[in-house]
């Protein structure tokens, strides 16, 4: 799997479903496949659900990118997000 590309627009400002009135979810899980274990990462928001299947190395690459992006902010603020354990904020 390739590293996520930063050149793509992060947010469509015309999509009203991405506002604070529409909660999002980030869900992760592991599964066994004939090719070995895989990480499933699902992002749900407004009108869309996207699931990515990746190996361990790719998952670590994505995690590093998210961590670097969070570190570059003065504080990560994600309103109305429900994480994998079903509680807002973790």
Image (tube, grey):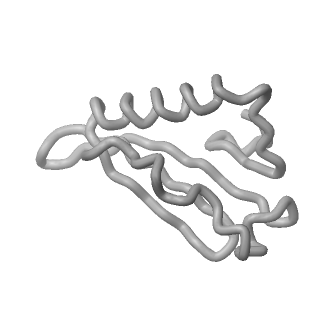
Q: Position of residue 25 (x, y in %)?
A: 65, 53
> In the image, is 19 to the left or to the right of 71?
right
Q: Where's the C terminus, which quadrant?
A: top right
Task: List x then y, in percent, for residue 81.
Answer: 75, 49
* Spot occupied by residue 4 in the image (x, y as percentages of width and height): 39, 46
- The quadrant in which residue 84 appears is top right
Residue located at (65% from left, 26% from top): 72
| Front-most of residues 24 and 10 | 10
Residue at the image position 40 percent from the left and 48 percent from the top: 5
Direction left: furthest residue: 34
Front residue (pair 84, 13) = 13
Residue 63 spot, x, y in % from top left: 47, 31
Looking at the image, how many numbered discs can be counted on the residues? 0
Quadrant hosting residue 60? top left
Of 32 and 81, the residue lying toward us: 81
- Identify whether 65 is placed above or below 35: above
Q: Is residue 41 above or below residue 69?
A: below
Q: Residue shown at 83%/48% (left/top)?
A: 79
Q: Who is closer to the viewer here, 87 or 8?
A: 8
Q: Residue at x 71, y 74 (%)?
A: 15
């Amino acid at each position: 799997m390739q590293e996520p590309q930063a050149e793509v627009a992060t947010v469509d400002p015309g999509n009203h479903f991405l506002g604070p009135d529409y909660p999002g979810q980030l869900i992760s899980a592991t599964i066994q496949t004939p090719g070995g274990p895989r990480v499933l990462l699902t992002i749900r928001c407004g009108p869309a659900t996207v699931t990515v299947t990746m190996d361990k190395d790719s998952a670590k690459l994505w995690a590093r990118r998210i961590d670097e992006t969070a570190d570059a902010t003065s504080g990560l603020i994600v309103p109305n997000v429900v994480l994998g354990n079903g509680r807002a904020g973790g």
